[in-house]
Amino acid sequence: MTRLGIDFGTSNTAAALMAGDRPYLIPVEPGETTLPTSVFFDPVREATLYGNAANRALIEGREGRFMRALKSVLGTPLMHERRVMGHERLTLIEVVARFLATIRERAEAATGQTITAALSGRPVRFHSTDDARNIRAQDDLAQAYALAGFSDVAFLHEPEAAALTAQPLDDGTYGLIVDIGGGTSDFSIFERAGNGVRIIASHGVRIGGTDFDRLLSSAHVMPQLGRGHDLKNEMGPGTHLAPNALFNDLATWEKIAFLYTPETLRTVKLFRKLAVERKPFERLYDVIESELGHDIAFAVEAGKIAANAADARIDLSVVQKGAGIPLTTVQMTDTLAGAVAGIGDAARATLAQADIPADRIGRMVFVGGSSLMQPVQASMTDLFPQARTIPQPCRDRCGTSARAKA
Ligand SMILES: Nc1ncnc2c1ncn2[C@@H]1O[C@H](COP(=O)(O)OP(=O)(O)OP(=O)(O)O)[C@@H](O)[C@H]1O
Ligand SMILES: [Mg+2]
């Protein structure tokens, strides 16, 4: 039986299967072994697009519903609500199922085999503190796999999948997988066992690159759209701060799609009317009406990646011709300090679970796109100064469980 290894990521997805004793990465997009975990429903053509095609449709400004970071919604009531997607009414479970079915079909096309079994990666913790939600998240994902035509699904913690592919250490020290993705940060400590490795401890926290994007957007972009600005009271004199919830949703990848309702539009129209300073709320109205939330999120993500190398700017020309906001490396480090500290805490908790001192970690393997972030790397080197660092083998991102033995 062919079992397909699937790394269903918050931001990117990859799949692999064993060809003989070697993993074979499926070309899930023409010439590529990862695809963005994105979906676009086109109501005009009655078509659903996935991956790069979905991202392109959004960037070209085509009419339709775009969604990304759906993995972050797993385990929440939103997964089971039926809503209009393009020309259909679907639950998000069904949307995830269609995405997974597309992966299955592409793997079948690439290999000529029929595939009904999957080994799926999962974060150690989908949700950091809510245990019931954490369990529901895997149940939701299992349900999506079943709907996608997989009759047999096993799950593996994402950092453990990465550890299984690591070179065993021969000096008696321990290895640490540091997998910082789009939605979660996951850690596994492993040691040598024969010719392979044995997992000693795994832990994770729901902080990832999409949280970096949210924090940067909230702090640097949302004030341009009215966050922190005053509205006049509807009744009587005085003013109050524009409510923060809407700005928070607009800065959060998985929430943006749900803002495009007549109700939100009515709310921002009222904000515009009550604004002490009208300009930011005019921009906000345009962003909601023209559905530019994801375009802003992409611009923030690009600004983040640029500012990780050198002082940069967030290009907001999609909101207003020529508009942009400077983002220096120092500003970014400041804005992300709390989130980076949370990732450090999770690494320390993994160590405590393994019950070994930090100086016994001889090697750190960085996996996942956000492990390229300088503040994250600095924090990990601080915590584990003795550890040799193994950079991730791929440039932009790395599949984790996809490379595990399927
Ligand atoms: N060069 C880079 N510098 C900084 N961040 C980057 C870079 N390239 C990608 N990222 C970020 O990495 C994240 C995606 O990483 P990855 O593909 O490993 O996540 P994922 O596997 O989809 O998510 P998860 O495992 O958390 O579900 C995104 O937030 C992206 O912005
Ligand atoms: Mg990942």
Image: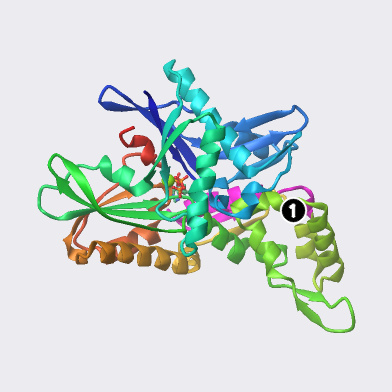
Measuring 81% from the left and 74% from the top, which residue is drawn there? 276
Q: Judge whether residue 30 can be spotted in this image.
A: no
Residue toward you, 293 or 160: 160
Residue 346 location, x and y as percent?
Answer: 36, 63
Tell me: residue 19, above or below residue 167: above
**Callout 1 amino acid:** Val
Q: Which residues are magenta?
A: 286-314
Does residue 107 lie above or below 183 as drawn? above
**Residue sticking out furthest to the left:** 171
For the rendered model, the colour scheme is: rainbow
Q: Residue at x 68, y 66 (%)?
A: 245
Label 1 crowd (10 A; few <14 / some 14-19 / many >=20): many
Name the residue that disc number 1 marks: 287
In the rendered structure, does residue 299 fall within the stretch colored magenta? yes
- Which quadrant: the C terminus? top left
Q: Is residue 322 left or right of residue 285?
A: left
